[in-house]
Image (cartoon, helix red, strand yellow):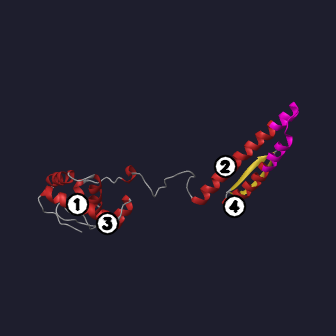
C-alpha cells in the first residue's frame, strides 16, 4: 500500500510503508532538524523584533520536525519488532488472570486419570461431582491448576510448565501434592502419577 501526501496541490508518492523507507525519511528529517538548529544559533544574539519573530518561527519548525522524527522512530520500532513500542508485556507473557483456565469439576477423574479422546460415560452424576469438588477444596490454587490441567485436560507436564510459567519439576511437585491431598480427602483411592 502506498502512502501519498498532498503538498502545495501536488501529490507526492512516499513509497511503501517499510522500515527502510521510514529510516530514509528519518535521516532527511534529522538533516532538516540540524539545519534549523544551525539557523537558530546563527540568529543569536537577537537584537530586533524581526529577528525574534524569525527565531520563534524557526523554533516552531524545529519542534515540529523533532516530533516527526519521534513518530518515524516509533513506526520503525513497531515494524521491526511486530509489537507496539513501549509495550512491556507481549501476548506470550500473560498475567495470572489471563492464564486462568476454567474447568468443570465433573471433567476431573474420580479415581484415576482418563486422558483419551472418546467420551467417558458419567458414572455417579451429581454424587461424583460433589466428591470431586470436596476433594479439590483442600488444594492451593497452583495445585488445583496443575492437577486440573494434567488430569482433566490431559496436558503434559512440559505444556503445563510453559502455560503457567513454572518449571516442569514444579508441575510434577504440585500434581503429586494435589494427588496426595485428594487421596486423603477422598479416602485413598486415587492413582498417583509421578
Is 47 included in the stretch rendered in magenta? Answer: yes
Residue at label 4? 20
Relative side of 69 to 156, left or right:
right
Q: Residue lying furthest top in this view?
A: 49
Mark earlier in primary sequence (2, 4): 4
Q: Tell me, for residue 71, which label it has, or none.
A: 2
The residue identified by callout 3 is 169
Whichever of labels 1 and 2 marks the residue nearer the N terminus, that label is 2
Residue under label 1: 177
Q: Judge left or right: residue 41 versus residue 144.
A: right
Q: Residues within 10 Å of mark 4 (few under 14, many from 20)?
A: few
Residue 113 is drawn in which quadrant?
bottom left
Q: Are marks 3 and 1 in contact (CB under 8 Å)?
A: no
Quadrant where the C terminus sits is bottom left
Q: Residue at x 88, y 32 (%)?
A: 48
Residue occupying the point 38% across, 54% down: 99
Q: CA distance from mark 2 to mark 3?
A: 46 Å
Across and down, in percent, residue 94 comes to 43, 54
Q: Secondary structure at mark 2?
A: helix
> The magenta stretch spans which residues?
34-55
How far apart in space, not on screen, are marks 3 and 4 (Cα)?
46 Å
Q: Nearer the viewer, mark 2 or mark 3?
A: 3
Task: Tell me the SS state at disc 4.
Answer: helix
Structural distance between the alpha carbons of marks 1 and 2: 53 Å
- Image coordinates of residue 156 in percent, x first then y, are 32, 67
Amino acid at each position: 500500500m502506498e502512502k501519498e501526501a498532498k503538498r502545495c496541490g501536488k501529490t507526492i508518492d512516499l513509497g511503501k510503508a517499510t522500515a527502510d523507507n521510514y529510516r530514509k525519511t528519518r535521516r532527511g528529517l534529522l538533516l532538516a532538524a540540524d539545519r534549523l538548529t544551525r539557523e537558530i544559533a546563527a540568529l543569536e544574539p537577537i537584537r530586533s523584533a524581526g529577528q525574534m519573530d524569525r527565531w520563534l518561527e524557526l523554533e516552531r519548525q524545529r519542534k515540529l520536525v523533532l516530533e516527526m522524527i519521534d513518530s518515524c522512530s516509533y513506526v520503525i520500532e513497531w515494524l521491526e519488532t511486530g509489537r507496539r513500542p513501549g509495550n512491556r508485556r507481549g501476548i506470550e507473557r500473560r498475567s495470572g488472570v489471563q492464564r486462568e483456565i476454567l474447568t468443570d469439576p465433573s471433567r476431573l477423574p474420580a479415581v484415576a486419570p482418563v486422558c483419551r479422546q472418546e467420551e467417558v460415560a458419567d458414572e455417579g452424576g451429581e454424587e461424583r461431582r460433589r466428591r470431586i469438588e470436596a476433594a479439590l477444596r483442600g488444594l492451593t490454587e497452583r495445585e488445583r491448576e496443575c492437577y486440573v490441567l494434567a488430569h482433566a485436560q490431559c496436558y503434559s507436564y512440559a505444556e503445563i510448565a510453559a502455560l503457567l510459567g513454572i518449571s516442569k519439576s514444579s508441575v510434577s511437585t504440585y500434581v503429586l501434592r494435589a494427588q496426595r491431598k485428594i487421596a486423603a480427602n477422598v479416602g485413598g483411592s486415587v492413582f498417583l502419577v509421578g
